Image (cartoon, rainbow, N blue to C red):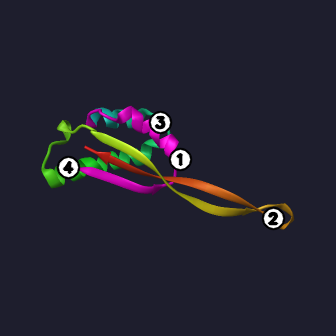
Amino acid sequence: EVSASGQYISMSADKARRVIDQIRGRSYEETLMILELMPYRACYPLLKLVYSAAANASYNMGSNETNLVISKAEVNDGIFVKKFKPRARGRSYPIKRPTCHITIVV
């Protein structure tokens, strides 16, 4: 098993899970087609991670990319990036941007 992980990806974990559930257990080539055609913003970082996992598998294990299968894919919550937006009359409004950690195993 070879893995690739992306940390602190600026996206909600629920939105990433919606795409991860579609590619779990599929072959490498089928995964690439699915991710290129889906209209979600989460597809681009996932596509980069799948490419990275395949490159890791071919470099470290010497395996062919046509034989790869996404055996495990998980999304975990990351930290919230906290910022303050200035508002009227000198007040401030907190903004919390969610992040997530994604791990893909082929």
The residue carrying mark 4 is: 57
Q: Do the residues labelled 4 and 3 touch (CB within 8 Å)?
A: no
Q: Nearer the viewer, mark 4 or mark 3?
A: 3
Q: Which of marks 1 and 4 is in front?
A: 1
For marks 1 and 2 on the same chain, the one whose residue lies earlier in the sequence: 1
Which residue is at 14% across, 51% downward? 61
Q: Which residues are the magenta region?
A: 1-28
In-front residue for pair 60/33? 60
Residue 106 appears at what percent x and percent y? Answer: 25, 43
Label 2 environment density (alpha carbons within 10 Å; few <14, some 14–19, many ≥20): few
The residue carrying mark 3 is: 18
Q: Distance between the residues labelled 4 and 3?
A: 25 Å
Does the magenta-highlighted stretch encompass residue 57? no
Q: How far apart are marks 1 and 2 (CA)?
A: 27 Å
Q: Nearer the viewer, mark 4 or mark 2?
A: 2
Q: Do the residues labelled 1 and 3 touch (CB within 8 Å)?
A: no
The residue carrying mark 1 is: 12
For marks 4 and 3 on the same chain, the one whose residue lies earlier in the sequence: 3
For marks 1 and 3 on the same chain, the one whose residue lies earlier in the sequence: 1
Q: Do the residues labelled 4 and 2 touch (CB within 8 Å)?
A: no
Q: Distance between the residues labelled 1 and 3?
A: 10 Å
Residue 1 appears at what percent x and percent y? Answer: 20, 47
Which residue is at 69% across, 63% downward? 84
For marks 2 and 3 on the same chain, the one whose residue lies earlier in the sequence: 3
The residue carrying mark 2 is: 91
Asked whether residue 11 appears in the rendered view, the answer is yes
Q: In this view, does 88 lie above or below 28?
A: below
